[in-house]
Image (cartoon, rainbow, N blue to C red):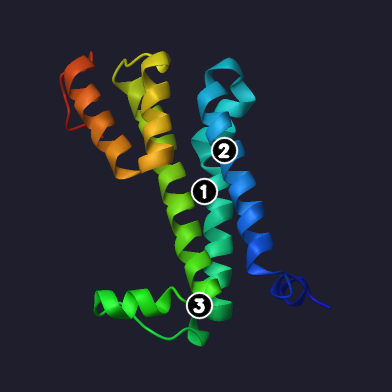
Amino acid sequence: MSIFQKTKNMSPESIFSICGSVTMLGWILLIISPLNERIKKIVNWGLIPFLLSLVYAWLIFAYFGDADGGFGSLAEVKKLFTNDHAALAGWIHYLAFDLWVGSWALSNSKKHGIHHFLMIPILLATFMLGPIGLAVYFIVRMLYSKTPDHDNF
């Protein structure tokens, strides 16, 4: 039995739980990354968002054709996400992108001279509220950046 067949037998709830735990580990690593050079490399490389992206891709290729609905209207999206695998793929999409945004913001904050302790609440906001955390980061970067060139993303 191939690994694809074995993982296809996993329940959506199991995949949800594993991805949630791995993502939580990623957020913890972001917060403690200044304490350890090896952890900093893992965070900067984006290993966990990459792994989540692979799970997302697997879900899309393995199950997306099984779901009704689509992206043409809100009603179609709602119908699409009544399928457990499609909803799980959507959730992992959020997990991967929010974690990547947090990783990018942390890396970018170093380029702009923003202290790590100021980034911790921003990381928590990004973890809980995604785009709001990103917006707060942009505001903080604009206000506190020691680098006047804000075109340097």
Q: Residue at x 41, y 78 (%)?
A: 80
Up/down of 117 relative to 53, above or below = above
In-front residue for pair 87/103:
87
Q: Are marks 3 and 1 in contact (CB under 8 Å)?
A: no
Q: Amino acid at mark 3?
A: Asn
Name the quarter where the C terminus is drawn: top left
The residue that appears at 65% across and 54% down in the rendered structure is 17
**Of labels 2 and 1, the one closer to you:** 2
125 relative to 137 in the view: left or right: right
Query: Which mark, residue 83?
Result: 3
N-terminal of the pair, mark 2 or mark 3, is 2
Could you give the CA–CA distance between mark 2 and mark 3, rounded to whole angstroms? 27 Å
Crowding at dot 2, Cα within 10 Å, few <14 / some 14-19 / many 20+, comes out as many
- Residue position marked by numbered label 1 in the rendering: 49
Seen from this angle, which residue lies furthest right?
Answer: 1
Counting from the top left corner in percent of width and height, residue 139 is at 20, 27
The residue carrying mark 2 is 26
**Quadrant showing the N terminus:** bottom right
At x 24%, y 78%, the residue is 73
The three-letter amino acid code for the residue at tag 1 is Pro
Percent position (x, y) of residue 85?
Answer: 55, 73
Q: Secondary structure at mark 3?
A: loop
The amino acid marked with disc number 2 is: Gly
Dot 2: what SS?
helix
Q: Residues within 10 Å of mark 1 (few under 14, many from 20)?
A: many
**Marks 2 and 1 close (CB-CB < 8 Å):** yes
